[in-house]
Image (cartoon, helix red, strand yellow):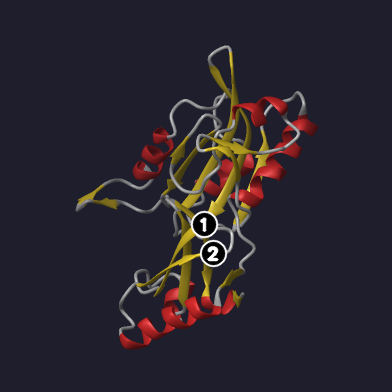
Amino acid sequence: MKRLTWINPNKCQINTGFKRFDEQCTLITTGNAYTSTQRSWYIRPYNECECNGQMFKPGYLLEKDLEALGNIFNMQKLPYLIEKEVFDKKRTESILLYVFGTYRDCKFNAFGVVLTDKCGKLIDYTIVGHNHLNKYASAVCAIIPYITNEGTTRVPEHVLNELLAQLALDPYCMAKVNHLGDDMIERNYSMRFFWKDVKDEWAKDKSPYITIKSGYHTDDVVRLSDVKTA
């Protein structure tokens, strides 16, 4: 996953070729977010009906998740292909719905929609609107590397060894190591086995996965088998 660089603590450096977006963008991040140019939220599966011990009808929680994004589209509904993925009744995992746009005349105008799975794997994306399609497409393609990962990441060898040693002592724990990199950014590395959802393919073989955080933002979530040492 590509990491942002910063002009100052409140403004990231981004060059997508879409001038208005680049000027207004303060942050691109993963997970639930509401920024000057991004709206994103985890969307639960259609058939997930339980929340905080209460049961709801199929689709109710999904609709509530979409409502959490607010009135962000300059359209009646989601783009067709995105809507098809979001409302797919066979989906069993939450996905992340990202909407990117800019403000003009006090109105948020969406130009791109991106879907990823919970681990940052790209599912689909589309361009919104009928004008400036090349500009919008270029911007979305430039944004995607900041919110998706290729399934591999590099971890300092001593950090990986320490995480594995902690899991060897207690396979049910959340192994954690803090490390200050050569770029002087402190990252929190954590690793644990995926036990929670028996329907998940990772749970069947109990594969460990690792997350890496810089500050409050998750950079990568990948399987141990995809980790490379640095």
**Relative vertical location of residue 213 with respect to residue 203 in this rendering, above or below:** above
Q: Residue at 44% of width from left, 47% of height from top?
A: 43
Q: Most extreme residue toward the right, as rendered?
A: 134
Residue at the disc numbered 1 = 185
Q: Most extreme residue toward the left, as rendered?
A: 53
Residue at the disc numbered 2 = 181
Q: Quadrant of the N terminus?
A: bottom right
Q: Secondary structure at mark 2?
A: loop
Q: Residue at 61% of width from left, 49% of height from top?
A: 146
Q: In the depicted view, which residue is nearer to us: 27 or 114?
A: 27
Please state which amino acid type lies under the numbered disc 2.
Answer: Gly
Q: Quadrant of residue 194?
A: bottom left
Q: Quadrant of the C terminus?
A: bottom right
- CA gap, disc 1 to disc 2? 6 Å
Q: Residue at 51% of width from left, 34% of height from top?
A: 10
* Circles 1 and 2 in contact, beta carbons < 8 Å: yes
Q: Residue at 35% of width from left, 48% of height from top?
A: 58
**Relative vertical location of residue 5 with respect to residue 22 in this rendering, above or below:** below
